[in-house]
């Protein structure tokens, strides 16, 4: 079997590189190159970012944060649908995922990457302004409002996955079947096969016997940049990783990671990282955060109930040693 070269295209958005890989043999879409089509749809992610970012005062989410306690804020259909999705996921995870957790993240200093240990009364004050049930969405008027003063939304745990799904749908609409998208390596969607039937003499039977179908995606070491723990074969699946391995601080000998449990107001710290696989990138993005804060029993029970592949990475006894706990529908590759 010969190897098909991969074309790599990227665009900077949402504070990371969105990267699309396509097999070289797929470089035509109709009468133009697939590169032109991919780049055009990559650039469209900027419009999604402009709607969801909290760092621009004129974004839809910024307007919600500024005005939604005073009055309902009208939203575009795509943004409103994403807020509905976020609230549905919050309900399914019993609040482990919550886009209203912004006040807690800010209180702990992680918004500006300046982690600090807040006082208990500060945490309690922030918790009073957090809660997905206080985000009121009106379907008929397509508006959002806050039931509690001082609330704020942050789409950081769902926005990249949403953008990846939108991009994947656009590429499929162009007739493309084989591609991989990742945003900052932690959010991935794999469609089709990284090595389609390049050899005219190759049969599907031969192809299946040679190796699994799909794309081989690396799973990163949580504390050693550039090192991989292994890989996963993904085909028409999404992957997301959440963890505290890179953003954390120490206070009085205790380690605090940046992933906050919205239900308690305190960082979750059982694992260095959690990686999961599921069908859509938006679900993978949100659920990797939710399951990370749930704890082992609840995370594994949720993953089993919903057919999710799960990799839990915890610290070993020696420096930078890690322990892997894998479960669910995964095709693991050791190198």
Image: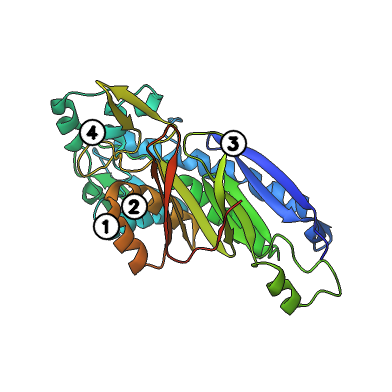
Q: Nearer the viewer, mark 1 or mark 4?
A: 1
Q: Residues within 10 Å of mark 4 (few under 14, many from 20)?
A: some
**Residue of label 4:** 150
Name the mark on residue 226. 3
Nearer-N-terminus badge (4/3): 4
- x and y, in percent, of residue 207 in the image: 73, 72
Nearer-N-terminus badge (2/3): 3
Nearer-N-terminus badge (2/4): 4
- x and y, in percent, of residue 311 in the image: 43, 54
State yes or no: discs 4 and 3 in contact (Cβ < 8 Å).
no
- x and y, in percent, of residue 223 in the image: 47, 34
Nearer-N-terminus badge (1/4): 4
> SS for tag 1?
helix
Quadrant, the N terminus:
bottom right
> SS for tag 3?
loop
What separation in Å lies between label 3 and label 1 (alpha carbons)? 31 Å
State yes or no: discs 2 and 1 in contact (Cβ < 8 Å).
yes
**Residue of label 1:** 298
Q: Does residue 265 appear in the picture of this structure?
A: yes
Q: Residues within 10 Å of mark 1 (few under 14, many from 20)?
A: some
Q: Is residue 32 left or right of residue 67?
A: right
> SS for tag 4?
loop
Location of residue 47 by image quarter = top right
Q: Nearer the viewer, mark 2 or mark 3?
A: 3
**Residue of label 2:** 291
Nearer-N-terminus badge (2/1): 2
């Amino acid at each position: 079997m010969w190897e098909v070269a991969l074309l790599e295209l990227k665009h900077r958005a949402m504070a990371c590189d969105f990267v699309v890989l396509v097999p070289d043999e797929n470089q035509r879409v109709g009468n133009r190159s697939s590169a032109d089509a991919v780049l055009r749809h990559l650039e469209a992610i900027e419009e999604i970012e402009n709607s969801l970012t909290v760092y621009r005062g004129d974004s839809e989410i910024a307007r919600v944060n500024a005005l939604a306690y005073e009055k309902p804020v009208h939203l575009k259909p795509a943004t409103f649908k994403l807020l509905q999705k976020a609230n549905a996921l919050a309900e399914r995870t019993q609040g482990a995922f919550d886009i209203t957790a912004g006040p807690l993240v800010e209180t702990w200093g992680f918004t500006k990457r300046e982690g600090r240990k807040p006082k208990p009364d500060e945490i309690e004050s922030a918790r009073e302004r957090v809660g997905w049930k206080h985000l009121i969405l009106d379907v008929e008027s397509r508006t959002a409002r806050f039931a509690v003063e001082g609330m704020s939304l942050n789409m950081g745990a769902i926005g990249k996955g949403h953008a990846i799904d939108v991009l994947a749908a656009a590429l499929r609409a162009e007739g493309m079947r084989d591609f991989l998208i990742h945003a900052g390596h932690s959010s991935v969607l794999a469609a089709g096969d990284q090595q389609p039937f390049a050899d005219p003499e190759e049969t599907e039977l031969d192809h299946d016997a040679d190796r699994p179908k799909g794309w081989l995606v690396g799973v990163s070491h949580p504390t050693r940049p550039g090192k991989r723990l292994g890989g996963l074969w993904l085909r028409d699946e999404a992957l997301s990783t959440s963890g505290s391995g890179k953003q954390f601080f120490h206070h009085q000998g205790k380690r605090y990671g940046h992933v906050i449990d919205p239900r308690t107001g305190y960082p979750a710290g059982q694992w260095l990282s959690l990686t999961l696989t599921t069908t859509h990138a938006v679900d993978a993005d949100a659920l990797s955060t939710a399951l990370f804060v749930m704890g082992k029993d609840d995370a594994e029970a949720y993953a089993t109930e919903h057919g999710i592949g799960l990799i839990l990475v915890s610290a070993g006894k020696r420096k930078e040693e890690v322990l892997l706990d894998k479960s669910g529908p995964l095709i693991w590759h050791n190198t």
